[in-house]
Image: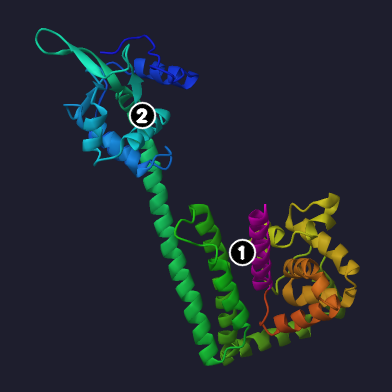
Amino acid sequence: MHGEHITTPFGRRPMTLALVKRQTIVSEIRQGKSANKWKIFRDVSEAKVMLDLKDRSLAVLDALLSFHPENELRQDAQLVVFPSNAQLSLRAHGIAGATLRRHLAFLVEAGLIVRKDSANGKRYAHRGRGGEIESAFGFDLSPLLARADELAAFANQVVAERTAIRRAREKLTICRRDIRKLIAMAAEEGVSGDWDSISETCTALLKPLNHSASLETINRVLNDMGLLLSEVINILKFHSDSDNPSTNDAHSEHHTQSSNTESHIESERHRKSLACEPDAHHGSARSPAENVPLSMVLRACTDIGAYGPGGTIATWRDLMAASAVVRSMLGVSSATFEDACHVMGPENTAITLACILERARHINSAGGYLRDLTRRARQKAFSPTPMLMALLRANSGAAGRARTIT
């Protein structure tokens, strides 16, 4: 049974508000509460990273629990254990005295045990005439009982994250395998495409991954790899459609019929609708808003933000408006700009111009470069996604070097 008073530490160890709070929590354990001590220990072991504990600390906690005679920790039972350092060291696999004291302090700091010090700092118990323990001085295990539900929640969270990481890595492995094998197949079958660049991008995207990569990092890489896989599949689909005569004939027939029925004024209106105005829509190319996050574009192309409305970019409309400004600044003619929009679509053109702006000092003629990219896009041999990935890799590397220097 636990008293309501606060116990201060023996010797030079100071009293802190944290110790007061922990002892207050212990005194508020629900009446009749109990929990299996080894279940609690397993939860602590799972949640050791969240509790900032090392394996040695767990070994000491395991030894402390072994001195409690019952498997259940109960609110109405005596939960203070009082082994000597020599006994503790023996049960903690021969841990050295200084190391033992350090890890006992870690357990106290983590709020898993509380010191209940005697007047002289020794650990012992007062027993009644029948041999039952009336009071004891040593290490109080009550915090483990008080926090049993919280520790179980921590353990569940860690297990859930571990499961999510394992599944994300499985998906990433499959995605990487698909990209590699599709690139190898395309090269072997002679499918036109910038396969070397895509392969280099794939390698660069996987570079941040290591054994301890977080779930957030893995998911970010998985998302980028998924976009890259979509690009590969789209190139292969276009090649497949080009080799299918029935598809090409149907497309040609549809085009002929449209040409016969469409007036000159309608053709001109259709051509202008494909120009890169911020509110334009296009049907000849898919919108990156459906597969490339705007946030990824802005992470890769940091310079474009200053040219958005009000000096910021929050939407795809803002990006396209900024691209119109950048187009003029880079000396790209309106004809080249409109041709790019017609072939790639306004959003893809805006992304491409943002990438060109980011590497402007390395490009002699932005207009000529955009014309060449447009020509390749017309042949389904160019997409801005690999450019984005390369810039993301470059920015990540620069940030890493800056952190190292700092």
Q: Is residue 266 visible?
A: no
The residue indicated by pointer 1 is: 291
Q: Which residue occupies 80% across, 51% down?
A: 312
Nearer to us: label 1 or label 2? 2
Residue 405: give x, y in percent of width and height: 67, 56
**Amino acid on which disc 2 is placed:** Leu
Give the overall secondary structure of the magenta segment. Answer: helix
| Quarter occupied by residue 49 | top left
**Amino acid on which disc 1 is placed:** Asn
Q: Which residue occupies 51% across, 57% down?
A: 219
Q: Is residue 340 visible?
A: yes
**Colour option used:** rainbow
State whether residue 208 is above or below residue 117.
below
Q: How many marks?
A: 2
State whether residue 52 is above or below residue 208.
above
Q: Which mark is residue 112?
A: 2
Query: In this orientation, which residue lies closer to the viewer: 356 or 190?
Result: 356
Q: Which residue occupies 53% across, 67% down?
A: 206
Q: Residues within 10 Å of mark 2 (few under 14, many from 20)?
A: many
Q: Which residue occupies 42% across, 53% down?
A: 164
Residue range highlighted in magenta: 384-406
Q: Secondary structure at mark 1?
A: loop
Q: Quadrant of the N terminus?
A: top left
State whether residue 386 is above or below residue 117.
below
Q: Secondary structure at mark 2?
A: loop
Q: Is residue 171 left or right of residue 403?
A: left
Q: Is residue 376 left or right of residue 239?
A: right
Query: In this orientation, which residue lies closer to the viewer: 86 or 311?
Result: 86
Residue 142: give x, y in percent of width and height: 31, 22
Residue 254 colored in magenta in the image: no
